[in-house]
Image (cartoon, grey):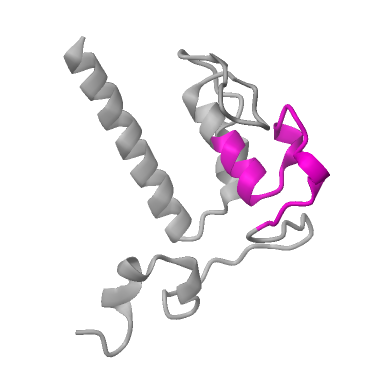
Amino acid sequence: MHNEGAAFRSLVNNFAIAISVGLQYGVPLEEYVDAFTFTRFEPAGLVQGNDAIKNATSIIDYVFRELAVSYLGRDDLAHVPPAGAAHEQLRPTDAASSHTPPQSPEDSPDLAARSWVRSRLPGSP
């Protein structure tokens, strides 16, 4: 049983790294949310400790529902609407806007972690 837990933990860790790198290279969070919400595998069931999400079909489903509700304002994926329904969004979503990823870290350093672009900035040691 110990080895199965380690394998699962390693798989989830590497999945998280892959998503993080994709976001840093400009893949829109909306794409990930659309791809991974409603995935179905065990463990699944009731969620405790979250005011908006009460049920998830998998761990991945829960993570991407939470990201969608918190960062994209996707209240349609929440089971309980947020109180007041006026919470901050980090980036407003607009279906008509097209997302153009930056060509280099210098074009938009605020979209990537400073540690990721530190070695890529001009004049960096």
Residue 54: percent from the left, percent from the top? 65, 22
| Residue appearing at x 48%, y 79% in the figure | 107
Q: Nearer the viewer, residue 81 or 116?
A: 81
All told, the count of numbered labels is: 0
Q: Is residue 103 visible?
A: no
In the rendered image, the residue lying farthest to the top is 1
Residue 6: percent from the left, percent from the top? 22, 23
Q: Is residue 67 visible?
A: yes
Would you place residue 105 above or below residue 32 in this image?
A: below
| Residue appearing at x 44%, y 60% in the figure | 25
In the rendered image, the residue lying farthest to the bottom is 123
Residue 77 in magenta? yes
Would you place residue 89 above or below residue 64 in this image?
A: below
In the visual, does 8 lie left or right of 100?
Answer: left
Residue numbers of the magenta segment: 64-89
Residue 93: percent from the left, percent from the top? 72, 56
| Residue appearing at x 61%, y 35% in the figure | 65
Location of the C terminus (image quadrant): bottom left
| Residue appearing at x 52%, y 54% in the figure | 27
In the visual, does 100 lie left or right of 22?
Answer: right
Residue 109: percent from the left, percent from the top? 45, 75
Location of the N terminus (image quadrant): top left
In the visual, does 71 lie left or right of 6?
Answer: right
Q: Quadrant of residue 12?
A: top left
Residue 92 in magenta? no
